[in-house]
Protein backbone atom coordinates (compact mmCIF):
# COMPACT_ATOMS: atom_id res chain seq x y z
CA UNK A 1 0.00 0.00 0.00
CA UNK A 2 1.16 3.52 -0.76
CA UNK A 3 2.55 5.32 2.31
CA UNK A 4 0.45 8.40 1.50
CA UNK A 5 -2.69 6.24 1.71
CA UNK A 6 -1.65 5.04 5.16
CA UNK A 7 -1.03 8.63 6.26
CA UNK A 8 -4.48 9.67 5.03
CA UNK A 9 -6.02 6.68 6.79
CA UNK A 10 -4.40 7.77 10.04
CA UNK A 11 -5.45 11.38 9.54
CA UNK A 12 -9.08 10.43 8.90
CA UNK A 13 -9.23 8.26 11.99
CA UNK A 14 -7.64 11.06 14.04
CA UNK A 15 -10.24 13.56 12.84
CA UNK A 16 -13.02 11.05 13.58
CA UNK A 17 -11.66 10.60 17.09
CA UNK A 18 -11.40 14.37 17.63
CA UNK A 19 -15.00 14.74 16.48
CA UNK A 20 -16.08 12.20 19.09
CA UNK A 21 -14.22 14.13 21.81
CA UNK A 22 -15.89 17.39 20.71
CA UNK A 23 -19.30 15.70 21.05
CA UNK A 24 -18.47 14.07 24.39
CA UNK A 25 -17.34 17.44 25.80
CA UNK A 26 -20.51 19.11 24.53
CA UNK A 27 -18.61 21.54 22.27
CA UNK A 28 -20.41 20.32 19.15
CA UNK A 29 -23.36 18.04 18.62
CA UNK A 30 -23.46 15.06 16.31
CA UNK A 31 -25.97 17.03 14.24
CA UNK A 32 -23.65 20.05 13.93
CA UNK A 33 -20.78 17.88 12.72
CA UNK A 34 -23.13 16.08 10.34
CA UNK A 35 -24.32 19.39 8.87
CA UNK A 36 -20.74 20.59 8.39
CA UNK A 37 -19.77 17.34 6.64
CA UNK A 38 -22.88 17.42 4.43
CA UNK A 39 -22.07 21.00 3.42
CA UNK A 40 -18.52 19.94 2.54
CA UNK A 41 -19.84 17.05 0.45
CA UNK A 42 -22.34 19.33 -1.30
CA UNK A 43 -19.54 21.76 -2.19
CA UNK A 44 -17.41 18.95 -3.58
CA UNK A 45 -20.21 17.40 -5.64
CA UNK A 46 -21.58 20.71 -6.91
CA UNK A 47 -21.42 21.39 -10.63
CA UNK A 48 -18.84 24.16 -10.23
CA UNK A 49 -16.36 21.85 -8.45
CA UNK A 50 -17.09 18.50 -10.06
CA UNK A 51 -18.08 19.52 -13.59
CA UNK A 52 -16.19 17.30 -16.00
CA UNK A 53 -14.86 15.16 -13.15
CA UNK A 54 -15.25 11.42 -13.60
CA UNK A 55 -17.45 9.48 -11.17
CA UNK A 56 -14.39 7.72 -9.76
CA UNK A 57 -12.69 11.08 -9.13
CA UNK A 58 -15.82 12.38 -7.37
CA UNK A 59 -15.86 9.21 -5.27
CA UNK A 60 -12.22 9.76 -4.35
CA UNK A 61 -12.87 13.36 -3.30
CA UNK A 62 -15.96 12.43 -1.29
CA UNK A 63 -14.61 9.26 0.32
CA UNK A 64 -13.01 11.01 3.34
CA UNK A 65 -16.11 13.13 3.93
CA UNK A 66 -18.39 10.10 3.78
CA UNK A 67 -16.12 8.10 6.07
CA UNK A 68 -16.23 10.91 8.62
CA UNK A 69 -20.02 11.11 8.26
CA UNK A 70 -20.29 7.41 9.12
CA UNK A 71 -17.83 7.70 12.00
CA UNK A 72 -19.87 10.65 13.30
CA UNK A 73 -22.94 8.42 13.52
CA UNK A 74 -21.15 6.16 16.03
CA UNK A 75 -22.05 6.77 19.64
CA UNK A 76 -19.34 8.94 21.26
CA UNK A 77 -18.99 6.53 24.16
CA UNK A 78 -18.69 3.46 21.88
CA UNK A 79 -15.55 2.16 20.25
CA UNK A 80 -14.84 3.59 16.80
CA UNK A 81 -15.07 0.99 14.02
CA UNK A 82 -11.81 0.29 12.21
CA UNK A 83 -10.86 2.22 9.08
CA UNK A 84 -11.42 -0.86 6.93
CA UNK A 85 -14.91 -1.39 8.33
CA UNK A 86 -15.84 2.27 7.79
CA UNK A 87 -14.38 2.16 4.26
CA UNK A 88 -16.45 -0.92 3.45
CA UNK A 89 -19.56 0.85 4.74
CA UNK A 90 -18.82 3.88 2.52
CA UNK A 91 -18.65 1.58 -0.50
CA UNK A 92 -21.89 -0.17 0.41
CA UNK A 93 -23.88 3.05 0.85
CA UNK A 94 -22.58 4.85 -2.25
CA UNK A 95 -25.33 5.95 -4.60
CA UNK A 96 -24.93 7.00 -8.24
CA UNK A 97 -24.55 10.68 -9.02
CA UNK A 98 -27.38 12.46 -10.88
CA UNK A 99 -25.51 12.29 -14.18
CA UNK A 100 -25.10 8.50 -13.84
CA UNK A 101 -28.82 7.74 -13.75
Image (tube, grey):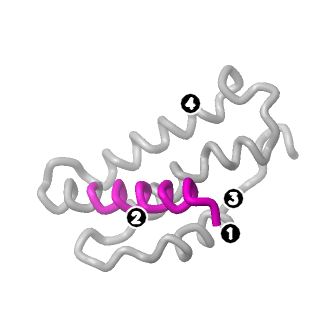
- Out of 33 and 6, give the one closest to the viewer: 6
Q: Are marks 1 and 3 in contact (CB under 8 Å)?
A: yes
Are the residues tagged 1 and 4 within 8 Å (C-beta)? no
Label the magenta part by its dominant secondary structure. helix
First in sequence: mark 4 or mark 2?
A: 4
Per the rendering, the mark at residue 73 is: 2
CA–CA distance in space, label 3 to label 2: 16 Å
Residue at image position (49%, 36%) is 40
**Which of the numbered marks, if any, corresponds to residue 92?**
1
Q: Are marks 4 and 2 in contact (CB under 8 Å)?
A: no
Element marked by disc 3:
loop
Residue at mark 3:
94
Which quarter of the picture shows residue 46?
top right
In space, the residues marked 3 and 4 are separated at their CA atoms by 17 Å
Q: Which mark is residue 18?
A: none
- Residues shaded magenta: 1-18
Mark 4 → mark 2, Cα distance in angstroms: 21 Å
Cα separation between marks 1 and 4: 22 Å
Q: Residues within 10 Å of mark 4 (few under 14, many from 20)?
A: few
At x 27% / y 56%, what residue is drawn?
18
Which of the marked residues, 3 or 2, is nearer the chain's N terminus? Answer: 2
Quarter where residue 35 is shown? top left
Residue 43, placed above or below residue 95: above
Q: Quadrant of residue 54?
A: top right
Residue found farthest to the front: 3
Pinpoint residue 55: horizontal percent, then vertical percent.
79, 44
Going from N to C along the chain, the mark reached first, 3 or 4, is 4
Q: Which mark is residue 43?
A: 4
Vertical placement of 26 versus 70: above or below? above
Residue 54 lies, with reference to residue 69, above or below; the image says above
Mark closer to the chain start, 2 or 1: 2
Amino acid sequence: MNVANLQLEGLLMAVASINQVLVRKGLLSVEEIDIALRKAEACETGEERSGGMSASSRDAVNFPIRLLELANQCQPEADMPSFSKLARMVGQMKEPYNDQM
